Amino acid sequence: MEYRRLGASGLTVPVFSFGTGTFGGVGRLAGWGKTDATEARRLLDLCFDAGVSMFDTADVYSRGESERVLGEALKGRRDKALISTKATFRFSDALNDVGSSRQHLTSSVEASLKRLGTDYIDLFQLHGFDAMTPPEEVLSTLDVLVRAGKIRYVGVSNFSGWHLMKALNVADKHGYPRYVANQTYYSLVGRDYEWELMPLGLDQGIGAVVWSPLGWGRLTGKIRRGQPKPEVSRLDTTAEMGPPVPDEQVYRVVDAIDEIAKETGKTVPQIALNWLLQRPTVSTVIIGARNEEQLKQNLGAIGWNLSKEQVAKLDEASKVTLPYPYWHQRTTFTERNPPPV
């Protein structure tokens, strides 16, 4: 296993983290998997054996069941693990059980600690941007939680660049904890992260914690040009939760991956994951698995690297037109606006 710093922090994390969205299997995530504590413990055994010691969850995953199952599976070995969890999305119908207010963050952290069976969270992230709560209130609350030892590092997820930069300025002004992680969507069929958030991460020391690295199941190797969609696919239950991707874009990327697969003997997911590991700012990539075989296959993405030529081929196949003003900056003034990659 390879290890990296989480952004500019002093925390070291494995390049692969294990996502526990399949744990619990309640509500809208039931289609991802219904892993119980017994199977979860076995999956964690494989993770620890491979050096994967960071586990990602959230309070809303299966209505808290993901955290509870993860806590059960970690009993007796909490000291070996890094736990990453998140809050801000609505958890119940209660009036204030939503957002990044002092009320909600404080109660959310306490509830997560109880479900996880631990007294501290290694990385606590805001699951989404709350436009209704001032950043001063958010960060002062996180500061209290850090000083109380209930959380150790803080991060964000699904923020835009200006949201994140404004929060960092507030943190610097008042001496509050700085965000060191950005849990972000990034894949060969979803490279929006590179437009603004990657340059910000390079400039401000924010490590990318990548989620959905296989593009919502589009890069599993089961979707190819001229072939029917598989009968069982994660896209059936989650496509509406993510951005649409034109079929031709997916086929173009998979065609390029297939060529590299013939050269390397690696699978489509392994190549897609390895490409991500070579991108700037990426601290860790969250991999998931419904079963042990999927986990073992994903772990095969480390211990080797794509060549520069292979990376260039994937870069070209996955390239899309940038939105304004990025296409203007990259095409008319590259002398002073070099691309981050």
Image (cartoon, helix red, strand yellow):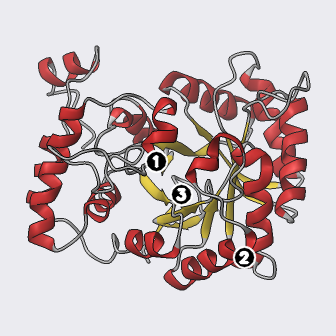
Residue 283 x %, y %: 46, 57
Residue 312 visible in the current orientation: no
Report helix, strand or loop for mark 2. Answer: helix
Q: Nearer the viewer, residue 242 or 7?
A: 242
Report helix, strand or loop for mark 1. Answer: loop
Left or right of residue 258: residue 211: right
Q: Quadrant of residue 48?
A: bottom right
Looking at the rendered structure, the kind of residue marked 2 is Thr
Residue 274 x %, y %: 30, 62
Q: Residue furthest bottom?
A: 49
Q: Which mark is residue 38?
A: 2
Q: Nearer the viewer, residue 24 or 174?
A: 24
Placement of 20 over or under 159, stated as above or below: below
Looking at the rendered structure, the kind of residue marked 3 is Leu
For label 3, the residue is 6
Q: Residue at x 9, y 70 (%)?
A: 263
Work out which quarter of the rendered image holds the N terminus and state it.
Answer: bottom left
Q: Nearer the viewer, residue 231 or 335?
A: 231
From the viewer's perspective, is the residue at label 1 or at label 3 nearer? 1
Work out which quarter of the rendered image holds the C terminus and state it.
Answer: top left
Looking at the rendered structure, the kind of residue marked 1 is Arg
Mark 1, Cα crowd under 10 Å, few <14 / some 14-19 / many 20+, is some
Placement of 115 over or under 247, stated as above or below: below
Q: Residue at x 85, y 65 (%)?
A: 118
Residue 17 x %, y %: 53, 63
Q: Quadrant of residue 299?
A: bottom left
For label 1, the residue is 234
Q: Are marks 2 and 1 in contact (CB under 8 Å)?
A: no
